[in-house]
Image (cartoon, rainbow, N blue to C red):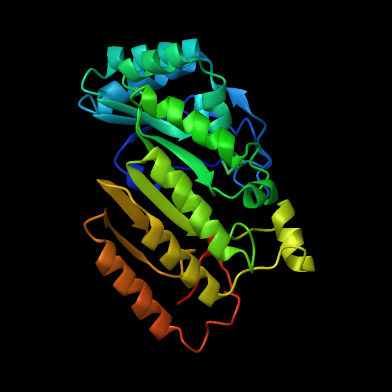
Amino acid sequence: MNYTGTTFRPPFEANSLLLQVTIGCSHNKCSFCTMYRDTPFSVEPMEQIRADLAEAKAYVPGARRVFLENGDPFALSADRLAEIAEAVHEFLPAVETIAMYASINNIRSKTDEELVRLRSLGINELNIGVESGLDEALVLMNKGYDSKEALYELGRLRAAGMDYGANVIFGGAGAGKTRENASATAELINKTSPYLIFTGTIHADPGCPLYNDMQTGRFPEPTFGEHIDEEELFLRELDVENCLYFGLHPSNVVRMQGWLSRDKQAMLEEVKNTRQRLQNRLGDVPVRYGEGAILL
Ligand code: SF4
């Protein structure tokens, strides 16, 4: 299989076949992201994709799920995505779902009819960095869309029958705005019913604009206490069903997962226990390690 540079995938795609169809990210401008900073966006030739699929067929002929790489393969045209999906089914007939990272901007470039066509070819369960429902936070993170556009595009995606997993970043609006961020994000999530919510807290590595803003204090980082308060309010205001809440990212202050709405009370209890455990550090800004990891 051909992979260029570092290849990323969500933790819950650990058992999926990773198939590179793009290199880098077509946006590559989110203020907190260094994933593809030095990797210009390009498209993998169809011949290479078919060669990779032929190789995969030899090793995992019964593969059920494919995750397309890299940063936002949904940026490809609907015709190219359809061609890739047809090739996947040709080589790996047991595949049921073709998932990938996608952005709100990628949905915007597809018509309703194209979305329905892609869904009929098995493309589903897109992992989308929604990050926040608060416009101020979306500007700070340089996502390239506002909350109204996110709501509209996610609505079109859902109307085409596609499920999506939402990535949410606590603290994206900075210190002092965590409650606003929690409520606005919960509202957006409630209106778009993802099948999965993947949470993390805001962090930045050297090499991205947000890192400099954190160093100079232009972006005031939330404290442990604010992160916990934001997650509690977000959880309380969430109104979704059959949705996996995946909160195990190492950048999270509260590490937990569960099904909503079934496990909501147990998860709120975990938030309470974490606040109790960290009672002497609630006013501190977390020290970060790789991937924004916090030592608890
Ligand atoms: S967060 Fe996602 S969309 Fe933003 S620059 Fe990084 S890979 Fe691209």
Would you identify the image quadrant in which residue 216 lies? Answer: bottom right
Residue 170 in the image: state x and y as whole percent: 52, 60
Q: Position of residue 64 (x, y in %)?
A: 24, 29
Q: Is residue 163 above or below residue 52?
A: below
The residue lying at 44 percent from left, 30 percent from top is 155
Residue at x-position 51% and y-position 43%: 130
Q: Relative to 136, is 101 on the left or the right?
A: left
Q: Residue at x 58, y 82 (%)?
A: 283
Which quarter of the image is occupied by the C terminus? Answer: bottom left
Res 1 visible: no
Residue 253 in view here: yes
**Front-most of residues 129 and 84:** 129
Q: Give the quarter of the figure containing the N terminus.
A: top left
Rendering coords of residue 263 (x, y %): 24, 61
- Compared with residue 21, is residue 276 higher up or lower down, i.e. above or below? below
- Residue 120 x %, y %: 31, 16
Q: In which quadrant of this rendering is ligand 1 seen? A: top right
Using residue 31 as the reference point, say whether residue 69 is left or right of it.
left
